[in-house]
Image (cartoon, rainbow, N blue to C red):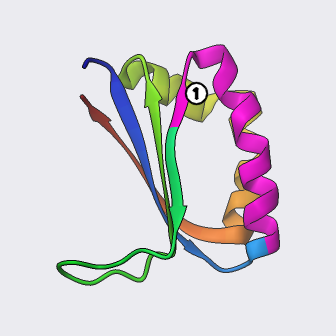
Amino acid sequence: MTGACLIGRVKVRNAEKRDAYRRGIPATLVPWNATLVARGSGPVVLAGETDETDMVVIRFPDLETIERWYRSDAYQALVPLRQEAADVVIVGYPI
């Protein structure tokens, strides 16, 4: 497998705004040939500690594409909603 994955670690503060943000994401992925791999809530912690409530994994062709998607007008339009909805850590990893 080649490409890159975006991992989002999320601590939701407002579920209604989180849901609105999540509904907006799929359309932003289409131009970047990105695929939503997994999205979940209510983690079971097996080792260590976390206060995260949600996670997301999105597959992209490469890290450069993740960065270009993140800076895109379509995604940036959702950032204020994300900031109101949750505390989020977003990272990209090559795979």
Residue at 42 percent across and 83 percent down: it is 51
**Residue 26 or residue 73, whichever sits in front:** 26
Assess whether residue 30 is covered by the magenta stretch. yes
Residue at 74 percent across and 78 percent down: it is 14
Compared across the picture, whether 47 is left or right of 54 comes to left
Under circle 1, the secondary element is helix
Residue 52 lies, with reference to residue 72, above or below; the image says below
Amino acid type, callout 1: Trp
Residue at 19 percent across and 81 percent down: it is 48
Residue 36 lies, with reference to residue 32, above or below; the image says below
Query: Which part of the image, by quadrant, shows the C terminus?
Result: top left
Q: How many marks?
A: 1
Could you tell me residue 4's position as x and y percent? 34, 27
Q: Residues within 10 Å of mark 1 (few under 14, many from 20)?
A: many
Compared across the picture, whether 35 is left or right of 94 comes to right
Residue 68 lies, with reference to residue 11, above or below; the image says above
Could you tell me residue 44's position as x and y percent? 35, 78
Could you tell me residue 43's position as x and y percent? 42, 74
Q: Which residues are magenta?
A: 16-36
Compared across the picture, whether 46 is left or right of 20 comes to left
Assess whether residue 72 is covered by the magenta stretch. no
Compared across the picture, whether 62 is left or right of 60 comes to left
Corner quadrant of residue 84: bottom right
Residue extending furthest left?
47
* Residue identified by numbered label 1: 69
Corner quadrant of residue 92: top left
Query: Which part of the image, by quadrant, shows the N terminus?
Result: top left
Q: For the stretch drawn in magenta, what is the main secondary structure?
A: helix
Could you tell me residue 85's position as x and y percent? 71, 69
